[in-house]
Amino acid sequence: MFDPVNSKVDFPALEREVLAFWEENGTVEKYLTRNKGAEKRASFIDGPITANNPMGVHHAWGRTYKDLFLRYRAMKGFEQRFQNGFDGQGLWIEVEVEKELGFTSKRDIDAYGIGRFVELCKERVLRFADVISRQSIRLGYWMDWDNSYHTMSDENNYTIWLFLKKCHERGWIYEGRDVMPWCPRCGTGLSQHEIVTEGYQEIEHPGLYVKFPLRDHAGESLLVWTTTPWTLTANTAAAVHPDRRYVKARYRGEAIYVAKALLSALRGEHEVLEELDGRDLVGLRYVGPFDELPVQEGVEHRVVAWDEVSENEGTGIVHIAPGAGAEDFALSKELGDLGVIAPLDDFGDFVEGFDWLTGRNVYDVNEPIYSSLKEKGVFYRLENYRHRYPVCWRCGSELVHRLVEEWFISMSELRGLVSEVAKKIRWLPGFGLQRELDWLRNMDDWMISKKRYWGLALPIYKCECGHFDVIGSEEDLRARAASGWDSFEGHSPHRPWIDAVKVECSKCGEEVSRIADVGNPWLDAGIVSFSTIGYREDREHWMKWFPADWITESFPGQFRNWFYSLLTMSTVLEGREPTRTVHSYALMRDENGEEMHKSKGNAIWFEDAAERMGADAMRWLYSRHNPAANLNFGFGVADDVRRRLMIPLWNVYSFFVTYANIDRFDPSADRPDLSERAELDQWIISELNMLIAEVTDSMDSFEPERGSRAVEEFVEYLSNWYVRRSRRRFWKSGLAGGAGRGADRDKLSAYFTLYECLVTLTRLLAPFIPFVTESMYQNLAGARNGRESVHLDDYPEADRSRIDAGLSAATRLAMRLSSLGRSARSKAGIKVRQPLAAALVILHDSDEIDVLPRIEAQVREELNVKEVALLEDAGSVLSFEIKPNLQVLGPKYGSRVRDIAAQLSQADPGEAHDVISSGRPVCLEDYTLEPGEVIVSSMSMAGYSVASGAGYTVAVTTGVSEELRLEGLARELVHRVQNMRREAGFDIADRIDVYYRGQDDVRRVLSVHADYVEQETLSRVIVDGEPPEGAYVESHKIDGLALTLGVLRAG
RNA sequence: GGGCCAGUAGCUCAGUCGGUUAGAGCGCAGUCCUGAUAAGACUGAGGUCCCUGGUUCGAGUCCAGGCUGGCCCA
């Protein structure tokens, strides 16, 4: 006996029970170790999740893929690694800890103590690693949760040292002086990786017009425009486009130079005095806006030529401050002799040499600068200007550009090497390679330093002599330590402890400190294909698992982040690909396709999703989605997928258990051979094996969305064709119990078939929806299969010998014809309960005509007609249409198809139909067409209702004879009694007595169809008379006939 | 300005190798079916398959150009 199954199931509650079951039985442990030492191996490397907050439903998407692919391969017998990873070093952690402590700047951290601060960062990572682990378990994500790796681990950090050392050996590491985007709040530069995505906002800035008076031309000025007034303090040049036209205009008694195209910058009356080329202005000297500042001493301000000067905004004369603008700095390097003045310190405060500005913050100096300019008489005009401006992706502060010294890995040689390695990988979706190569082509040198506290300690020791060393391991450091090793020993290689160690400069012998910088966090994540599998300590083990067979992550972002760093580090260390396959997926949106934001209120918490829709529904939703497209996630979508798969699946399961228990079906009994089972059974088993093949193929190629759709189609077939068509087989008496002599072989076949479908489905779907499949498997198979869990069972293998493509095609034809027949009935307004005399069909070709007998009974029952036949010899009452079957004719005749179509249109459709339905070819003027090459359909027929589709036609007779009418009434009667049984609360298997009072028609029906009604309603007797006390009674009207029915439980 | 992707019903999306009348779900209107089904079936309304040109007997599908949107990079 199976445990009874309620058709109304609470999936989240079921999932909690299953979680408890796994917990009790140690199922996860058994799963993780089931394939230890297996010959087949599949290597997965987890892209570390940031352990800084709880995970969201978008993480659950990726984690579903990871679990899905791992589970599939586990059931396929592959030995695998199940190591989850946490990413925990870097600014994002620091920012959150700062928030917790109420800090507003780096100074607070220094005051608090770097050691204490770093400890809090570590604690935060461990805290959220724990939260995420528990959430993942709720998702059904089966990993080795006690052995997750951390990017903050010693091993991870030291392996990066090794990588950096290799880079240094090849001369790729250098310290560069450059103007970089800088966050004054965080006190750090931002790398290109960080700024390109979330890094921009629409911000309103001042658009300030200022005059630069010319030195040798009294009364003449350049007009320049800037949106960053503070940079004027560092001005050293003004740039014009050499090939563009400029004008000198008289304006309020002085002469002003602006670009001709931007003359509108001058407000009010003015007169053009002269027109000239930009190149004519080059070399002119002018008075700078802040020449009085000490730092400006000795700077000669002049006009320079620059091709990048735009005529779209401003004045066409660009203020150049090489110490405060990236392009400006590039220009200064190009020209070689421009002054470079860097005004800001780490926190955006003006440095020494700026007189009254020194110590003031960049965010607070606009007003005083305006005043100063006005005093000097060079302030022209101020207006608001909206533009996209970079902000800090973590704290939202507006960035400034600042001249800094940072450490880089040169990409000039690496770019090509990494690109070649990228090409060896299979990228899914296919455009991934192009994206990655595009990024590699465009990216500058990789900035790896960050002036922060919590992160990789860059093992760079720069001596005052100008030489620098890169340390490659802790042993290396110990060996070279000149002092401080003792106080460091026992600590993780982080600030501040690591900085106690000083080494000797390998060039001059001086004692040198480590640079203060920490590393770019993508170094941390990129090294994991080495650090997590023993690259340094156990090379054999590493070789066993490297390269990975697959990874999966969200692609927006990762082309320049994880995929990039993984590739680069693997290229440097081993010159080969870190993974054979990159599977990736797009972004999650809300149900309306809008970005999810906590502040917008449209974000869905993982816990809410798990408890309201269930983890299985969530997982199925993810699995069936095309990963290249954004996923619109929400409760409505979850309802939809639950209806597509889980409810029909559960209903079939519930149906099976209900009847199997009634009949005491025993799956361990002798099962009828497939060949002796009904064709319907053979069909669904064929479909099942086709499904297994399809799902297996889709999983092997990392395309679960393809397999998922096939599953939904199968469940649809199972529920709405196999079970519906088989119901009668389960009801009929002749108990299967015992399965021995006298058992109904057909009924037994039905049970075995449905049982096989269900148990196979649980195994097939176990990686996708692990909870509901476990629940079903435990009840259906469980101990009988000798397995404790569906997840310890093997993945189903398709048995090709049980696939019958012809049968499959035939059944699909039966479905198609039934559907058309129902359509025809519906058009005529005749319900299916009313039997009709005949359905006549037009098929494509003689092959299908041959198949018709095979499916005739199915169609007959579906359409409730007495006969299904080919539409032939119907004579002149019909109107036919004939068309060429282009799919067949095209390849055969090519360009002559047009001719054929023309000749066919001249042929008589009725004749053509008669010829074809007898299986003979149609002769045209120049061509002879086989039956399959012509498509015939019927448009209308007297006495018939007709429906056509996809080249098929079904016509049902519309006349209802007295005999048919009575039969229809009988079915109607059955229908009413069935409903009453349910209303009265009888059990499905209860026997009843039926009482009725009604007109003669009713009696006539029962005189002919009493047996049928009794059998259908499980009635012992049908009595013409008043129902007795205690009977459930209802009054009915059927087609205008009044009658009273009573039902009473028998016995 | 360059690269990648997408554009199919009111919405969300399928659409295989180029081939008959381009499909599904949701939503709307209605009918039916139900002795597993919080379901299901059917009907109806709703499509210049972004546009233009090309290849082809035949283009939603292939090619070229353009438009719009998204992402990435300048």
Image (tube, rainbow, N blue to C red):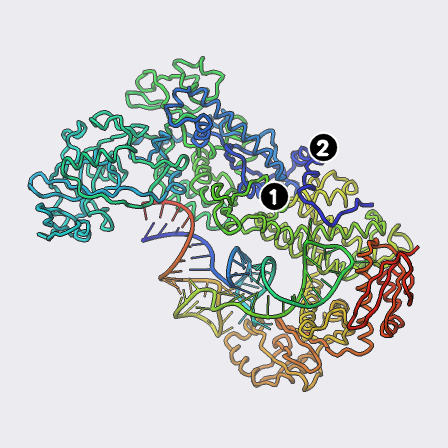
**Of residues A809 and A478, which is closer to you in this image?**
A809
Q: Compared with residue A470, is residue A824 higher up or lower down, i.e. above or below?
A: below
Across and down, in percent, residue A599 comes to 47, 41
Q: For the C terminus of chain A, which image quadrant?
A: bottom right
Image quadrant assignment for residue A185: top left
Image quadrant assignment for residue A460: top left
Across and down, in percent, residue A665 comes to 84, 50
Name the residue at 82% across, 51% down: A660
Residue at the front extreme of this rendering: A1029
**Which numbered marker is on residue A810?**
none
Which circle's residue, 1 or 2, is located before the other in the chain? 2
Task: Specify the amino acid type for callout 2.
Answer: Glu
**Which numbered marker is on residue A68?**
1
Image quadrant assignment for residue A713: bottom right
Task: Specify the amino acid type for callout 1.
Answer: Leu
Q: Compared with residue A965, is residue A727 higher up or lower down, i.e. above or below?
A: above
Q: Secondary structure at mark 2?
A: helix
Name the residue at 66% across, 83% down: A878
Across and down, in percent, residue A302 comes to 14, 39
Please determine if labels 1 and 2 lie on a single subunit.
yes
Q: Secondary structure at mark 1?
A: helix
**Which numbered marker is on residue A24?**
2
> From the viewer's perspective, is the residue at label 1 or at label 2 nearer?
2
Left or right of residue A741, residue A684 in this image: left
